[in-house]
Amino acid sequence: MMKTGTKLTDILTDVTIREGSQQEIDLRGKDPEIKLKLLELSVASGIKKIELTAFAPGEWFSDAEILAEKAAKKNYPAEISAIYFNPRGLETLLKFPALKAEGIFHTACTENYRTKNYNQPDIETVREKLKRMLAALKRHSLGLNKIMLSTAWGESAQKISPDETLEFAAMLVQTARMEGFNPEGFVLADTVGQATPQEINGLISAFKNEWPEKIITAHLHPQAALARECVHAAFEAGVNHWEASWCSLGGSPFADKPGGNLDIRILAEVARECGYLSGLNPDGIRAIEKFVEQNTGRSVESL
C-alpha cells in the first residue's frame, strides 16, 4: 500500500529501551544512564515516539521511575511514553506528567501465554481485569487507546486461527463498550515470531475489514530471513502503526523462544519501497549501531 509523502517516523513507536530491558543480552541490568544515552541517540536519529519503560513488577523494570524522572528533565522533542499492566502501574505513570499517558490493556490470545505472562487463566478473569483497568482509566478521564494482543498469531504450544483471534478481540470490544469505552485500536503482536508473511497479511486484513476505523499496530518478532516479507505483507494489508526496535533489541521474557523485535532499519528500508519517507538520518542510525555494538551482546550486521 503506497503512502507517498508520509514519514515512517509518524507511524512508528520505538520500543528499543523498554523491550531491551527485558533481555540480558541487551539492556537488562544496565545502568540507567546507558539507557538514557540510547534515548538521546534515538531522538537524534529522527524518532518521534519512544516507549521508555514499564511500570510493572519484574527486576528488569526496577529502574523505571529513575528513567522517567531523568527523561522528564530533558524536554526531548519527541513523545516519550511508558506502559503498565494494572491500575497500580497506571497510578505510577501518572506521577510523571512529562510522559504520555495512554489507556492500555494487555492480554494474549493463547491461554498458555495469557496465564504465564498476564495471570489471566480464563476468559472470565480477562473480562474482570479489563473492567478493573477501565474503571481506573475512567477515574483519570482517560480513554482506551489500545488493546495489546500478545500471541495474536498463536504460539508453539497453541495454534489459533484468525477467526479465533477476531472472536477474542470482539469479546474485548464488547466488554469495553458495556463499560462505556470504545477501543481506538489493537496492537497485534507476533510474540514468539512464528507468523508467516501470508498469515500476517491475513490477520491484519481481517482486523481492518472488521474494524476499518480502528488503528491497527503491528508488533512483530520475525525470523531474520522473513523480516522484509513480513513488513511488506503488513503494509499491503493496511497496517496503521508500527512498534519496532533498533537492531532487533528486545523480545518477550516469557516466550518459549523469544526472538528479537523487528529491526527499525529493515522497517525503514521496506517503508521506502512502499512509498514512505523514512524521517531518519543516516548519521543518527550509524551512531545507534555503534552504541548497540558497544553496550549490548549483539553483533550488528550492516544492511
Image (cartoon, rainbow, N blue to C red):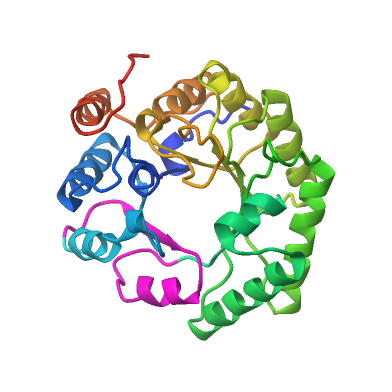
Which of 278 and 199 lies nearest the eye of the viewer?
Answer: 199
Q: Is residue 67 visible?
A: yes
Residue in the image at 70% along x and 79% along y:
179
Q: Position of residue 176 (x, y in %)?
A: 70, 71
Q: Position of residue 139 (x, y in %)?
A: 52, 85
Q: Is residue 213 visible?
A: no
Count of numbered labels shown in the rendering: 0
Q: Quadrant of the N terminus?
A: top right
Residue in the image at 74% along x and 64% along y:
122
Q: Residue furthest bottom?
A: 139
Which of 40 and 31 lies nearest the eye of the viewer?
Answer: 31
**Does the magenta portion include 2?**
no
Q: Is residue 209 above or below residue 302?
A: below
Span of residues in magenta: 74-101
Q: Is residue 17 above or below residue 298?
A: below
Q: Quadrant of residue 170?
A: bottom right
Residue in the image at 76% along x and 38% along y:
159
Residue in the image at 17% along x and 49% along y:
31
Q: Quadrant of the C terminus?
A: top left
**Does the magenta portion include 78?**
yes
Q: Position of residue 111 (x, y in %)?
A: 71, 54
Report the side of 236 relative to 98 (left or right).
right
Q: Position of residue 210 (x, y in %)?
A: 80, 49
Report the side of 98 relative to 179 (left or right).
left
Report the side of 173 relative to 281 (left or right).
right
